[in-house]
Image (cartoon, rainbow, N blue to C red):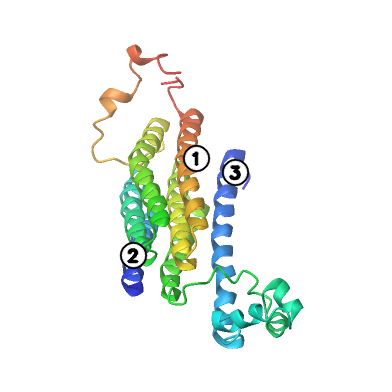
Amino acid sequence: MTGLPRFRRSVVAVVLLCGLALIGAILGLAPRTADAADTALPAIRPEDRRPTSGEGARVPVAASDGRDPGIASGTGSESNHNLVEQSGSTPLDIPLAVLATAFILVLARIATGPTLADRIVAAELGFVIVVCALIVLGARLGSIHPITVAMISALLQFVATAALAELLRRKTDPTGDNL
Amino acid sequence: MIWLATAVTTAGALLCLTAAIGLLRARDALSRLQVVTKASSFGIALTVIGTIIAVPQWDVSIQTILTAVFLMTVAPISGHLVARAVYRSGLIGQLATDDLARHAEPAPESERGTSD
């Protein structure tokens, strides 16, 4: 760790942040499906929520936030209830898990890469894996917002890779010219 | 339909996993780059196809196809940039044949200073 340059540490930090965002997205997905499975199974169905908002004059507190108060006291994780619309999209967790495993391997290569070039190549694959995971996350949630994020991060991925390659070439070019 | 989408998307994710395993097992930086570039292109293509099967809507399809087209367009470009930087930085390992050695080192005098 003595000869660790500042640039290498910044590469590791950026890719670690991407990995933490990916793992956080997957972990934020898991308790919601767990609550829907066992604890609040009849609670977040739409046919149970619909008469609650319809009888808003009788229960004005429940009509104000659109939820049953018994549900709200039970689990607090269905405040973003319009995200999980497709109940059949649960098997899309399998490619998310595979992508998370691939990202862990990429992190291992970044941690143990002998040279800076190996870390940059691994960061390239890490960016692609993050884009794939965002697209699969959009398909799993039935929402377009992660896919928009994936498109923008695909644009930024090329800029980041080009900048890393240019910095690597400027840092360690033996001829030292600007070709 | 959702299982078909899951199968296609899992195939794309498995391609990414294969690229990651190859990243761990390959010998030097150029081999790793060769593993990463091809597998990531096919991985993003299969992921997008599975997503379009899972969510058949126009906006999702347009944005995912735009993402895939852009990634598959710039993947050779970024691979070329990284490979050029790796070669010129001298971080390559043992190569069996080095056909570029006659041309690239040292840089030709006619191209110096033209692109900075």
Chain of the residue displaying label 2: B
| Three-letter amino acid code at the position of disc 1 | Ala
In-front residue for pair A15/A115: A15
Mark 1 touches mark 3? (CB < 8 Å): no
Of tags 2 and 1, the one toward the viewer is 2
Q: Which residue is mark 3?
A: A10
> Of discs 1 and 3, which sits in the foreground?
1
Residue B14 appears in the figure: no
Residues A109 and A139: in front is A139
First in sequence: mark 1 vs mark 3? 3
Where residue A8 sits, quadrant-wise, is top right
Q: Percent position (x, y) of residue A6?
A: 62, 39
Q: CA distance from mark 3 to mark 2?
A: 38 Å
Pick the quarter of the image with the N terminus of chain B: bottom left
The numbered dot on residue A109 is none
* Residue A23 vertical position relative to residue A2 in the rendered view, above or below: below
Q: Which mark is residue A160?
A: 1
Label 3 is found on which chain of the structure?
A
Q: Residue furthest front?
A: A57
| Residue B49 or residue A81, whichever sits in front | A81
Residue neighbourhood size for the residue with mark 3, other residues' Cα within 10 Å, grouped as few (<14), some (14–19), many (≥20): few
**How far across and down, in percent of the image, does residue A56 sit?**
70, 78
Q: Amino acid at mark 2?
A: Ile
Q: Residue at x 46, y 42 (%)?
A: A155
Image location of residue B93, percent across then percent down: 36, 41
Q: Is residue B4 above or below residue A40?
A: above
Q: Is residue B89 above or below residue B58?
A: above
How crowded pointer 2 is (Cα within 10 Å; few <14, some 14-19, many 20+) is rated as many
Q: Which residue is under mark 2?
A: B53
